[in-house]
Amino acid sequence: MTVVPPVRSAFKGPFPPGPRSWVPGSNLRAMQRDPLGFLTRIAREFGDVVHFTFGPQHLYLINEPDLIREVLVTKERAFMKGRALQRTKLLLGEGLLTSEGDFHLRQRRLMQPAFHRDRIARYAEGMRANAERVAESWRDGQTMDVAQEMTRLTLSIVAQTLFGADVSSEADEIGRALTELMEVFTVLLNPFTQWLMKLPTPKMRSTQRAIERLDATIYRMIEQRRASGVDRGDLLSMLLLAQDEGEVMTDRQVRDEAMTLFLAGHETTANALAWTFYLLAQNPHVEIGDGTHARMVLAESMRLYPPAWIIGRLALENVEIGGYTIPRGAIVIVSQYVTHRDPRYWPEPEKFDPERFRDEDPSPGPAARGPTSPGGRGRREAAGEGISRPKFAYFPFGGGSRICIGEGFAWTEGVIVLQTLARKWRLSLAQSTPVIPKPVITLRLRGGIKMTAHARH
């Protein structure tokens, strides 16, 4: 792994505008206390390129879509994953989310066939069957935590389609372990993470138990598949049979990739669906309708509450962005949450309006209408809004060579689950307390969300 020291005072700028404070640690505390509010505030106050510091570490928040494209696409070789995500190697190992360079490219190439659109189309039957099972299990007037329900469902879908396993009996246990790992993310933002993670505190002990719990499930799946010798054509078989220059992947390598996809493959979609049902409850006039409209609803939900809400990059060399030199060792941040609510590209940005995507297909899945989308090249006229919307005004799955490998899988799963459940049930909010975002690795709902199911007649 490339080690790049933080930028210290030897770099004299010029620096972009940004929040300045003579109180040590004030920016870090503000970020830890309310990251969404802090980043949104400084973006609106200081512009497209914002500079601030956490102690000796210099950070740059990039808010303009064409500049975001430079960071993620055209100048991506000047960057690597940010330190917070590098530190998740303590949890995820050298999986696709954390690995770098040639190793990352090799692993992605080995796994890509499992996410080909033809294969995703075959996964659809299992996705639908799992969603129908949940739809049949609900009862009229039942109140439940929809975030928890979606977590169980997407966990079952990922386990079945990608790993050929049934984890329904242990879904709650696995869900609690995954939540424990999510909770430790705030620790990863601390400059002293590597030492904090080694302290025998109750938090660190519970984190280690969570890792061991997940490892038990994943290593059991690996052991059973190796013992069977059966090639089921799913991701797990691909990983176990993969060869590179005559070498097969070790169980540890398979574990790291499985752990990453177990975490990312269900967590993001579960959050997207929970937020979608919340927004639908707030806007009862919006109907799901056919697959096209379901896709529009999901796209607008991920605009307002993107499951992946922030991307960090570490500068490997001095690189110019927006007329400023980003020095080697600085951290560059782009935030889907901030950009997706920028009024320059999204009129009435706080409003839930799926019609924004009427003439834009945001998904690359099997049912996509064509190659143009918010993730495509150049700019598009926003439907009915009279503005030219840049490509990276909407990037829920990232961009460049590190765009989420499971994007097509997530779109297909999200649309199928949304249609299947909404066809039979309408959900209403069943709590008086406000629903608050909880930005950890993903954008969760703080404390879940209580909703009541009403049967459609």
Image: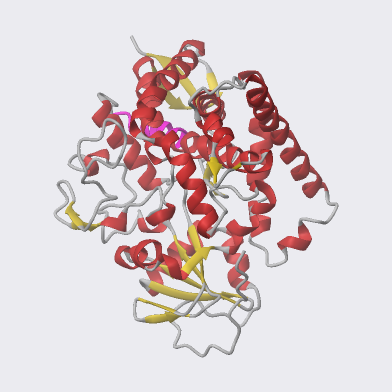
Highlighted magenta segment, given as a residue range: 273-285
> In the figure, 15 relative to 60: above or below?
below
Q: Residue at x 62, y 72 (%)?
A: 26
Residue 452 visible in the displayed image: yes
The percent coordinates of residue 177 (x first, y second) are 69, 36
Q: Is residue 346 magenta?
A: no
Front-most of 285 and 335? 335
Q: Is residue 279 magenta?
A: yes
Which quarter of the picture shows residue 423?
Answer: top left
The percent coordinates of residue 452 (x first, y second) are 48, 21
Front-most of 217 and 52? 217
Q: Main secondary structure of the magenta part?
A: helix
Front-most of 81 and 30? 81
The percent coordinates of residue 294 (x first, y second) are 30, 30
Residue 307 visible in the displayed image: no
Judged left or right of residue 327, residue 376 is left
Residue extending farthest front: 246
Quarter of the image with the N terminus is bottom right
> In the figure, 224 relative to 448: above or below?
above
Which quarter of the picture shows residue 258?
Answer: top right
The percent coordinates of residue 333 (x first, y second) are 47, 65
Front-most of 411 and 318? 318
